[in-house]
Structure formats: C-alpha cells, structure tokens
Image: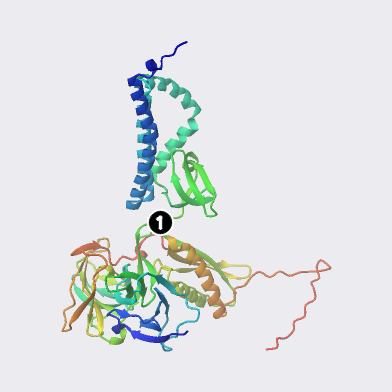
Amino acid sequence: MNIDLSQFFTEEKLTSLIRFAILILGGIPLLYYISRLIRTYTARKFSAQQGMIFSKLFFYLGLFIITFSVLNELGFKLHSLLGAAGIVGIAVGFASQTSVSNIISGLFLIAEQPFQVNDVITVQNITGVVMSIDTLSVKLRTFDNKFIRIPNETIIKSEVTNITYFPIRRVDMTVGVAYKEDIGRVRKILLDIARNNPLCLNEPEPLVIFSGFGNSSIDLLFVAWAVKEDWLKVKNSLGEDVKRRFDEEKIEIPFPHLSLYKGEATAPIPVSIVESAH
Amino acid sequence: MKKATQTMQLENLFQPIQLEKDICYHVNSGQLHVWLEQGMNEIRLTHIHQDNGAGAPALPDGADWTRWAFDDGQSIITIKPVFPERAIVITPESSFWLLKSTEATIYIRIPLWLRFILGGEKGRTLTELPTRVLSNTWFGSFSEGELCLWHLSDVSRTVDRSPEKMHLVICPLHLINLSEEDLLVDRICLRVNRLKMYHGGENLWSDTTTINYKGKNEKGEISMSGKAPDSDLEYTLLSAPRHRARKSFVAKSFQTLKELPGLGF
C-alpha cells in the first residue's frame, strides 16, 4: 500500500500543527511565568493574598483560552464541544460533587476572607501558617514544618480560629503565690515587670486579676499585650522576668507537695522537726 | 592588644569623625553608650543602655560586636541625631485639662535616636540606636491602629533649656480645643517622623506641631510649622523629617483604649 505523506501533510495542516506546538510549548510556560510575575509584583505592592488571587485568575483564564485554541487548531468545533460538554457535564457532575463543593467553598473563602495567606490559623486542632488558598484546598505549614492540605469544604464547615487576624494579642499567664504573700505587693511587682519589658504594650494596660484560692497557692491571672509579631517573645520573656523578680523580692511560688506513707495504711512515716541552725 | 578609649559627648558629634585604627571611641548620649572601632576594612560597634549615676561604664567584657565589612578602607563615621521612625505616645507626668475653645502651647522633651552613617552625611546608614529604650504601646482600637513608642514626660508651659538634657529634644506643641467639650490631655500621639530637628543654643529643638482637637470621635488636623521655633537663638537644621510632610494631615491624637468596649471583660 502506498501512503502519500504529501497528501497528509498539507500546507494547512502543517501550519495548524506549528500553531498547536507554539500554543502548548510556548503558551503554557509563558502563562506560568507571567502568573508568577503577577504574584510577586502584586504581593509586593499589595498583599500576599491578593498576589495569589490575581495570579490564579490570570493562570486559569489563560489556560481556558489556550485549551480552546488548541482544540480549535485540532479541528474541533466549539459549538459541538459545548453540546458534548452538556452531556458529559451531567455525568462528570455526579462523579465530582465533592470537587465542585470544594471549588465553591474556595470561592466563599476568598470572598469572605476569614484568613489570608501568611495568617496563622487553627482548624480542627491543626495550627499552621496559610501557604495558599487554592481551588480545592487550603495548604498549611505547621510550626514543626509539616505540610497539611485541608479541603475547602472542611474549612467552611469547621470552626476556624485566626490567631493573627488582629494586630495585637494578649499574653495570659497564671501566677501562683504563697498564701503568706501580700497580694497588693505582688500585683505592683507584676505590673512593674510588664512596664519594664520594652516589647510589652503600655496600652492596652497590663492587668493582674485575682483568679482564686488554689490548693496550695493564691492564683492570679497576669495579662499583658503585645503586637502579634512579638507575642512569643513577650510570653517567654515575661515568664523569665517573673521568676527572676520573685526570687529577688523573696516571693514564694508554691508547688504541690507529695507525702509518702509506708507500712500501715493510716500511720504516717514518723517525722521529727529539727530546729533551724539560724 | 587593648585599644585606648576616647570618650565623646553628643555636642562633639555633629561633624564627621575620622576613626583611628588604635582607638576605641566611646560615644555617650543619655543612657546610650556606644563603642566604635575600626578594623581591617571593617567597622565594629557595640552598645549598652545604662544610667550614668555610677559614672561612665567600661567596655563590657565579651561585648557583642556588630561588624560591617567594606572594601575601600572607609573610616569616616557621621553620627546624626534623628527622631524615631514610629510615632510616640506621650503620657504627661501629670495630666491636665484643656478647656473648650482655648489653646495652649506646651513643651515636651523626647529622647533622640542616633544614626550611624558610614562616610559623610549622604553615606550608608549602619544602624540607629535610641538614647533611651522606650517601651511599645498601641494607639488605635483592638482591630486597627499603629504601634507606637511610649514616653512618660513632664509637660511644661515654659522651656527648660538645661544643657545636660541635650539627648532630649524639645518639641513645642500647640494644642487648640475646637470642640464643645473640655479635653483631658493624658496622652498625646506625636508623629515625630514628620518633624525637623534643629540645634539652637545648647539644646536640640523640633519645629512646632499644631493639633486641632475637634471632638472625641473626630480626627483632628495636625500641622508642622516646618521652621525653627521663634526665639532669640540661632538654629542649625540637623535633620529633615523622615517622611516628607504635607502642610497638614488629619489623624487622631488623643484617643485612648479605655474608651473602647470589652476591656472590663
């Protein structure tokens, strides 16, 4: 059988093939490149969240145009494609309910903006930094550097805590002091500690709130404020400052004592008190 | 080999300093003590904040030096007094009332920052250090606002020109109460990054800030005079504003978080 290649590779088909190659080999990398540029530029000019939205919009729009141009080059007619898409759409729709739900949930997340890229959120006991809000899922990086993918639908249905939504955060610390201590003096010292910590905000004012009479201590709630970026530093430094200052001021931080009994169930170990040498 | 230390006071610092290789320079202003020395194509700097009550401190053992390397053997340092980048919330040592439809000029002293510049005045900024460590405070609401520095200051109606307070810039502030209520001045947010700094007499000065108070929930008009205060002194401009100021702008200057709901839990 003689195959005449010249009949197959007509000038028209060759031109079409070259256009197809240019669209695939040139168009898609170019789309990636420009969408990255848009992301970098917008993130720098506005915010990381807007960078992500604009680059994705551009990418998906470009992909849609390239796909239809390629199909057109291959000789598919757009109106027949759309007709077929209707029938296929019903079949695919049944099979992809979850995906569609995730896509719609993703749109709600972008519109409602309960969090943005680079925020720290907690969803179902998972806490991490939002890396991206994508079509189907939200990607988180946890603080121990794990990658977590949470479907958008799950996020819409769950309680989400955005830890970094507001610019300032409160540092709470429960401080227990011995019953013999003067609460007024302890309060003054704690407020002084907060005032002398340069990262602690003077306003909102730090507070010392009486918490209750504990088993072995008077419990006080010591609260101070910091900007969200300094929250961890303030939490750590306040704890160290309280311990150091209480040691200096001879304020006792009591801790639970455990008595051990040996032998008979009711008879304690005999203890004799030796008088102090001082 | 231990280098000889040469101590310099603030008033000697407004000219570029040629660093010698075998000298460690000690710069003091307020609570700030800086040691500067030149090494092989590098400049080293370390600092502490300490009151001068017990005399000038010695260079701490095992000091944590910050080093800047360069390739052209540059050894000139310019130290320039500047205002901090952030606004300062001033809390008067004793608050006062400004009656409605009245105005008053007050003087506040603000700690200055020192900018260390490699080369002349237009050289590269190495670092900026405060002559006193000020703590942070928040000016605004819980959901939005600005991070400011907090400073407890005596607020006087007359100028105290004592030269030993040269690390504190005298800022004249003209308050006008245009509202229908008396204004309790227990904090003032001063946008120091829009102020110029002058040297006059034996003190540092800023241009005058005028704040028009229009009511609790209103933003007031703030303007900077852009010129040295009126007096018999001769002034030299030391630093331009960090932010090129428009003639005036509107912002809140007296807001307090105590007025916001939710603080009492």
Which amino acid lies under the numbered mark 1 shown in the image of this protein?
Phe
Tell me: residue A134, above or below residue B236. above
Q: Judge from the rendering whether residue B25 lies leftward or rightward of residue A189; answer left or right.
A: left
**Circle 1: element type:** loop
Q: Residue B205: horizontal and vertical position, in percent?
A: 24, 78
Of residues A271 and A147, the one nearer the viewer is: A147
**Quadrant assignment, res B150:** bottom left
| Residue that label 1 marks | A166
**Quadrant assignment, res A26:** top left
Tell me what residue is drawn at x 38 percent, y 83 percent: B26
**Quadrant assignment, res B204:** bottom left
In which quadrant of the rendered image does the C terminus of chain A lie? bottom right
Tell me what residue is drawn at x 31 percent, y 68 percent: B87
Residue at mark 1: chain:
A
Task: Tell me the crowding category of disc 1: few under 14, some 14 to 19, or many 20 or more residues within 10 angstroms, Cα based.
Answer: some
Tell me what residue is drawn at x 30 percent, y 81 percent: B13
Q: Residue A46: horizontal and vertical position, in percent?
A: 33, 51
Is residue A72 in view from this perspective? no
Tell me: residue B7, above or below residue B253. below
Q: Residue B121: horizontal and vertical position, in percent?
A: 27, 73
Tell me what residue is drawn at x 49 percent, y 33 percent: A98
Of residues A150 and B190, the one nearer the viewer is: A150
Q: Residue A1: horizontal and vertical position, in percent?
A: 47, 10
Residue furthest toward the top?
A1
Residue furthest toward the right?
A263
